[in-house]
Image (tube, rainbow, N blue to C red):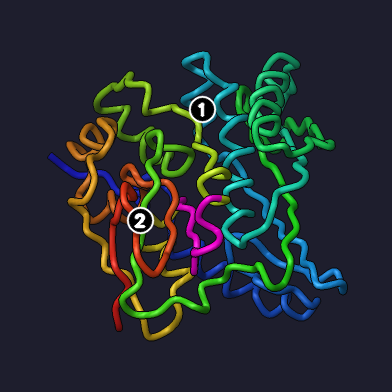
Amino acid sequence: MSRSTYEAAGVSLAKAVDVVERLRAAAESTGARGFGSFAALHPLGDGRLLAATTDSIGTKTIVARARGKLGVCGADMAAHCINDVITSGAEPLILLDYVAAGRVELEQVAELVEGAAGVCREAGVALVGGETAEMPDVYRDGELDFAATCVGVVREEDMIDGSMVEAGDTVIGLPSAGVHANGFTLVRRVLEDEDYDGDDLLAPTRLYLEDVRRLRPRARAFAHVTGGGIEGNLSRVVPAGLRARVDWDAWERPPVFAWLARHVEEAELRRVFNLGIGFLAVVREAWSGELVVGRIERA
């Protein structure tokens, strides 16, 4: 049986990295700080920095809408952006959203925004506004996109950027609810060969705000496990000369990943999906009850 890959499904992770590097000089010429990180930072001049991130839900909406669960994608988008912002040590403050479609359907927009609002209420984040765009020449019938921007604030002395990470540090993993919001172009290709109706397929992205608040006093780095998998996202916060060695047997994967494994090679699964770990913290030593999923070592 042929095995599915993300690139064959139409998404190139390598190209995504190339785009960031291609745009870096233009962005940094404007004074940008943290370009390419989970959250970009901008100093306010009073010892505080704004932390901001923006992202799109991608193709999860195609699967969710067909199963009557579009609101899940709204929750995904809010949690995803908040999780990115808090990797910097920031407190999230506000969220803005953007819905685009060939033809806007009020009920679908309402489902998305209400899903996002639920997460915002949980996080104490104000959903301050957004934009709805109807573009029939850009989107095909029935297609829509949902994106969001989150902004937070962090004091300079409280910023967490991975610069203090050292060899011997411990990597703690926080469980995911399932696939979350990344890799759905590949998921959809697998669904063409075999159906799956487990809750962990469309379960919304977990919000890790309370976990992060608890870990902040001793965290040396945080990583949100999105596109690129566990190793790919850890590499974004581990300094040059170091690497994370992941213990792939340290946790039990949600059932959805066993289903995907029947169609996707292990190396590709690790490169694309969170595999049951949605957020990571690098600390000196783990405390009792915390899930150790790796160690930092010299490259």
**Image height of 290 relative to 252, above or below:** below
> Total marks drawn?
2
- What amino acid is labelled 1 in the image? Ile
> In the image as oriented, which residue stretches furthest toward the right?
45
Pick whichever, 163 or 141, lies toward us.
Answer: 163
Upstream in sequence: badge 2 or badge 1? 1
**SS at mark 2 in the image:** loop
Label 2, label 1: how many angstroms apart (C-alpha)? Answer: 41 Å
* Closer to the camera in the image, 41 or 77: 41
The magenta segment: 214-226
Q: Position of residue 278 (x, y in %)?
A: 42, 46
Location of residue 190 by image quarter: top left
Closer to the camera in the image, 209 or 135? 209
| SS category of the residue bearing label 1 | helix
Numbered mark located on residue 62 in the image: 1
Query: Does residue 25 lie above or below 227 as drawn?
Result: below
Instruction: Answer few, some or many: residues within 10 Å of disc 2's Cα (few below 14, many 20 plus, some between 14 and 19).
Output: few
Which marked residue is nearer to the observer: mark 2 or mark 1?
2
User: Which residue position is annotated with label 2?
Assistant: 287
Q: Quadrant of the N terminus?
A: top left
Q: Amino acid at mark 2?
A: Trp
Q: Residue at x 35, y 65 (%)?
A: 285
Tell me residue 121's x, y (percent).
Answer: 70, 30
Side of 168 relative to 52 (left or right):
left
Q: Using the rendered view, name the quadrant where residue 36 is placed.
A: bottom right
* Residue 125, image x, y percentages: 74, 39
